[in-house]
Image (cartoon, rainbow, N blue to C red):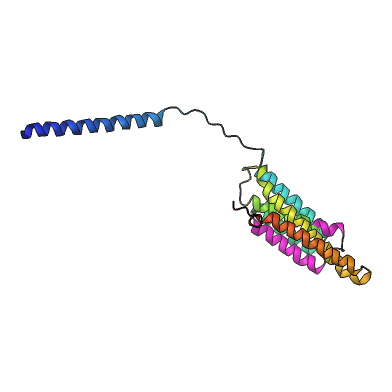
Amino acid sequence: MSFGGIGDRLSTGVGRRVGRWQDSARQARAGINAPKPPVRVETGQAAPGWAYRIGCLVLGVLAIIAFAPGVVLIVILSALLALVLLRPAAGTAGLFCGVLGLFWMIEPSPPNSLAQIAVLALAPALWVLAGVIADLPLRARIEIAVLRAPAIRYLVVQVVAQVALIGAQLLHSHQQGIGAGFAGLLVLVIAVIMAVAAWLLFPRLRGDQQ
């Protein structure tokens, strides 16, 4: 076999391969440049970020009103609430709730009063909502469905916290006439509620791995 014949075969093989590569490249470019069918993404009901911040404002103001602090503390809590509105996050809302809770311990609401229930409900609600919308722009559209899981956890914790607080106050007033049997039953009810809450909050306790 002459060297000329070998050269012709090599050049022919290389030419065929190059041709196939060019055809593949043209087909790939045609697929990329071809018009794409319209894609429609359906989302649930949504609200703008500023609407959620208004919700934080309402919760914070109601918590301050329920606590009914002095003028100086109103100014401090209002400044912290303004910080939450400017930079909503679990950290800023936690600072507001921490200061409110600290002074609430110093000057607590009347036992088993509506103000006590309101403060214990509103401040954590502000913390949960601020954590959900953390650092999102004012015009960002946020689906209302994202609040479902945090709301369920919030309600479970609220049931435990409210019952535990009322139970502690009733046990404290045991010396004013509450019988030992009633006090023991109250402790049992609180323990059962806490166990159910833990079962709801922690899926691993139910055997759910996902």
Q: Is residue 177 left or right of residue 131?
A: right
User: Quarter of the image holding residue 192?
Assistant: bottom right
What stretch of residues is rendered in magenta? 89-118
Compared with residue 195, is residue 33 higher up or lower down, i.e. above or below? above
Q: Residue at x 61, y 48 (%)?
A: 136
Q: Residue at x 15, y 32 (%)?
A: 11
Tell me residue 142's x, y (percent).
Answer: 64, 43
Is 189 colored magenta in this rendering?
A: no
Q: Quadrant of the N terminus?
A: top left
Compared with residue 196, is residue 28 higher up or lower down, i.e. above or below? above
Q: Residue at x 9, y 31 (%)?
A: 5
Tell me residue 6's x, y (percent).
Answer: 10, 34
Report if residue 148 is visible in the image: yes
Direction right: furthest residue: 177
Tell me residue 148's x, y (percent).
Answer: 69, 46
Tell me residue 120's x, y (percent).
Answer: 78, 59
Considering the whole magenta stretch, tell me its main secondary structure: helix
Compared with residue 34, is residue 80 higher up or lower down, i.e. above or below? below
Direction left: furthest residue: 2
Give the number of callouts: 0
Report if residue 125 is visible in the image: no
Q: Residue at x 25, y 30 (%)?
A: 19
Is 107 colored magenta in this rendering?
A: yes
Q: Is residue 204 left or right of residue 81?
A: left
Direction bottom: furthest residue: 175
Judging depth in this view, the residue of 28 and 170 nearest the camera is 170
